[in-house]
């Protein structure tokens, strides 16, 4: 039973019931981080702006593996207690519903990845640098937060470390200077951002302009693999153009691509950024579809975010379908041919997964990606190209920098097309049996 005045220590998401917190909504994170790469030591101050959504005599933040030393609200020191995963904060006087407040947490330690059923997440040391990849629950490994995608906020990240390294964070680089051999980097991310999409990337990177029209774009990479990187990411400006035509205006102020010197199992998306390993830059376009996939997440997953993790297909199915759109637009295999190919491949796999609610263990199962993409292609075949892309552009416009659910997408698709589409979405998303692709509409 909930205790009156005590904020819940969960966002109420059944997939990650121990993550997130209740009783308040976060407005902004201002993070001041001082880090030594050689010793992996972090000393930091997080200033978090929020508004109470109920009376709060106590509330909590997610924090894992780091120790808080002082907590204050509005500049006044307050009591706190810390468990392995939560920082419990007790205001001097209870906060009232609707009251804005600022909590400041001083903390330090040797950050490390968090072990989860999806692997290790969050803060990860590279051979010579740092990578932060938090989806879905790694953000508390480097800052105290309300760790659920439904609670988006703005970010300001000031990061200080050895000057020989380049630091890349979300948003616009507002300031850089070197003081006593230490580089001080300040990034500002005004667009509402989920905690798992906040990131820090550190390496001995060179940088070059991506050449995007109307959007600041930067490519970061180890100088030793420059030729391969430049070849493999040369199509990013054209990808942006294709996706803007299909999905609407690029939703961020900037786009950055980081290629690490390390080998990474999979690429990673962050708000306004994508991260690839050196193995994804072979100089022959071997990871072209992945480049398109991570770029598409800026529309689907980053701008239009998730209200709950069970709707993960709204991120991954859409980004997978963007791969097919790019393939078609670039003169390679058509989206329809790819859809029929993957429909055949899926027909040989177990049908024991519900795409619209796959369960925490199967959130990132490839069937969620491919059958999610097939759901969109089925919709395209039924309503026709003009209506289909009208739905996608309406979705990214109406839900820009918001969070959404599958039910909202179905409702929007029906409103935009004037068709009853519930049976189509139920068959593809909520029934285990794999449907046949419909015949193309004459619309």
Image (cartoon, grey):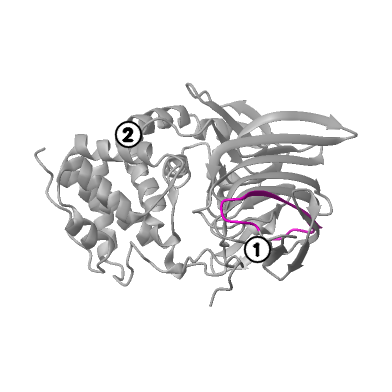
How far apart, in angstroms, are the residues tagged by discs 2 and 1?
41 Å
Residue 213 point in image, percent of width and height: 47, 21
Q: Is residue 172 above or below residue 436?
A: above
Q: Which residue occupies the foreground of this view, 365 or 89?
A: 89
Q: Which mark is residue 60?
A: 1
Residue 293 point in image, percent of width and height: 43, 44
Residue 91 point in image, percent of width and height: 72, 60
Which residue is at a point 47% across and 43% down the rendered structure image?
294
Report the label total.
2
Residue 30 point in image, percent of width and height: 69, 43
Going by the image, does 439 lie left or right of 393? left
Q: Which residue occupies the foreground of this view, 75 or 386?
A: 75
Which residue is at a point 33% across and 62% down the rendered structure image?
355
Look at the image and tell me in which quarter the C terminus lies: top left
Q: Which mark is residue 246?
A: 2
Going by the image, does 381 lie left or right of 110? left
Instruction: Tell me where the magenta segment starts and ends, as one range.
Output: 95-112
Q: Is residue 257 above or below residue 43?
A: above
Which residue is at a point 48% across and 21% down the rendered structure image?
214
Magenta stretch contains residue 111: yes
Q: Earlier in the sequence, mark 2 or mark 1?
A: 1
Q: Which residue occupies the foreground of this view, 258 or 146?
A: 146
Q: Residue furthest bottom?
A: 1
Neighbour class for label 1 at 10 Å: few (<14), some, many (≥20)?
many
Residue depth check, mark 2 versus mark 1: number of the one nearer the observer: 1
Q: Which residue occupies the foreground of this view, 98 or 266?
A: 98
Magenta stretch contains residue 15: no
Q: Secondary structure at mark 1?
A: strand
Q: Which mark is residue 109?
A: none
Q: Residue furthest left?
A: 442
Q: Residue furthest right?
A: 180
Neighbour class for label 2 at 10 Å: few (<14), some, many (≥20)?
some
């Amino acid at each position: 039973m909930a205790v009156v005045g005590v904020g819940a220590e969960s966002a109420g998401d059944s997939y990650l019931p121990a993550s997130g917190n209740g009783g308040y909504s976060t407005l902004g994170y201002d993070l001041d981080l001082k880090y030594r790469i050689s010793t992996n030591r972090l000393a930091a101050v997080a200033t978090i702006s929020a508004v109470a959504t109920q009376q709060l005599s106590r509330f909590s933040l997610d924090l894992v593996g780091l120790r808080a030393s002082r907590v204050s609200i509005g500049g006044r020191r307050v009591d706190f207690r810390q468990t392995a995963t939560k920082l419990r904060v007790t205001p001097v006087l209870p906060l009232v519903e609707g009251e804005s407040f600022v909590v400041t947490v001083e903390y330090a330690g040797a950050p490390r990845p968090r072990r989860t059923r999806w692997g290790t997440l969050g803060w990860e040391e590279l051979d010579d640098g740092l990578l932060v990849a938090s989806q879905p629950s790694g953000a508390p490994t480097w800052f105290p937060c309300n760790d659920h995608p439904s609670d988006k906020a703005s970010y300001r990240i000031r990061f200080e470390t050895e000057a020989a390294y380049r630091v890349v964070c979300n948003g616009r680089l507002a300031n850089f200077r070197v003081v006593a051999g230490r580089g001080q980097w300040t990034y500002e991310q005004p667009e509402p951002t989920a905690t798992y999409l906040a990131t820090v990337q550190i390496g001995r990177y060179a940088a070059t302009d991506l050449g995007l029209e109307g959007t600041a774009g930067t490519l970061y990479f180890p100088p030793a693999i420059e030729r391969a990187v430049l070849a493999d990411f040369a199509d990013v400006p054209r990808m942006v153009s294709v996706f803007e035509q299909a999905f609407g205006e690029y939703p961020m102020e900037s786009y950055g691509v980081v290629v690490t010197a390390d080998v990474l199992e999979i690429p990673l998306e962050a708000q306004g950024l994508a991260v690839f390993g050196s193995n994804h830059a072979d100089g022959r376009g071997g990871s072209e579809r992945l480049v398109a996939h991570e770029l598409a997440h800026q529309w689907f997953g980053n701008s239009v975010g998730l209200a709950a993790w069970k709707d993960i297909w709204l991120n991954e199915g859409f980004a997978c379908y963007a791969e097919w759109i790019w393939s078609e637009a670039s003169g390679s295999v058509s989206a329809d041919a790819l859809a029929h190919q993957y429909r055949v491949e899926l027909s040989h796999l177990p049908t024991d997964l519900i795409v619209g609610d796959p369960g925490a263990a199967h959130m990132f199962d490839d069937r969620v990606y491919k059958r999610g993409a097939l759901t969109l292609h089925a919709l395209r075949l039924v309503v026709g190209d003009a209506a289909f892309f009208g739905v996608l552009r309406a979705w990214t416009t109406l839900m820009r920098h918001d969070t959404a659910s599958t039910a909202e997408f179905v409702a929007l698709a029906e409103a935009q097309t004037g068709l009853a589409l519930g049976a189509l979405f139920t068959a593809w998303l909520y029934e285990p049996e794999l449907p046949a692709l419909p015949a193309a509409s004459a619309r």
